[in-house]
Amino acid sequence: MLAITLFALGSLSGCATRVAWEVRPAPTVELDTTNIAVATEDRACKPVADQLVRTLSARPGVVVQPRAETRLVVESCEQFVETTVEIQQDQLETGTLATDRRRTTVVGEGVAIVGVYNGQERIAEIEVSVDLQDRAEWNATEHGAPEVAGMSRGVDEELAVSIADKVAPLPQDLKRRMYKDAEPGTARALHNQAVVAEQDGDLDLALSLAEGAYAANPTASNMRYLEELEHHAETVGFVFATPVDPAE
């Protein structure tokens, strides 16, 4: 949740700049990913499991070890790939001759269920699904048309990425506007203070300041920042403190 990198991205009409930093999303399942194994007992799921090993191994800080106590077991997987060919016929005005145009579309769907184990104990379950489409241009050559085999590999890869995102999500970049020379006490100054608090990881303070900025100047951009701030909190698993009612 803490800021990792901070840098200026440039100016906006001479009155504002943008700053950016990285945040690490909260995993859906908390695991020690420095020592984790991947397995499957279903031959049909081996392509997904193999791709999951490659995907996790490429994630920062993740170490895949075949004999690790913590295991991700791809227990079930299904895949559906369908090819559709569209034919469009253009009638010529000078006669009955016609020209055909063809376009191929390949769609792929996949579902996988992964059991999360600590030793012999099954501690969690992960279910992911993907929906892909590859459409060629009209009258594409054989080399330009989508392939069923390629779509099948793509489904396996996307399932693996979706699983990896549940246990070892990649850092995400956040970008925020900062106003130059904002007068103290103004909506812009409150907005700037909110962004600084957000960078520091104090999302409760950031929300309070952002709400103050919106109250002082209820613009679409100030409302959009409130929504972005709430999305940031959701991404990193932060729960805003419940406001205390002074009457209680």
Image (cartoon, rainbow, N blue to C red):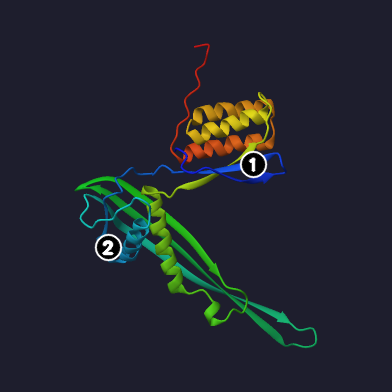
Viewer-proximal residue, 156 or 107? 156
Q: Along the horizontal axis of the image, is 159 left or right of 177?
A: left
Residue 39: percent from left, percent from top: 26, 58
Residue holding disc 2: 42
Q: Which mark is residue 17?
A: 1
Residue 44: percent from left, percent from top: 31, 66
- Identity, as a three-letter code, of the amino acid under mark 1: Thr
Classify 145 as above or below 57: below
Q: Secondary structure at mark 1?
A: strand
Q: Most extreme residue toward the top, as rendered? A: 247
Viewer-proximal residue, 41 or 66? 66
Residue at the image point whose x is 41% and y is 54% from the top: 162
Residue 169: percent from left, percent from top: 41, 49
Looking at the rendered image, the quarter that the N terminus falls into is: top left
Q: Secondary structure at mark 2?
A: loop
Q: Along the horizontal axis of the image, is 22 left or right of 215?
A: left
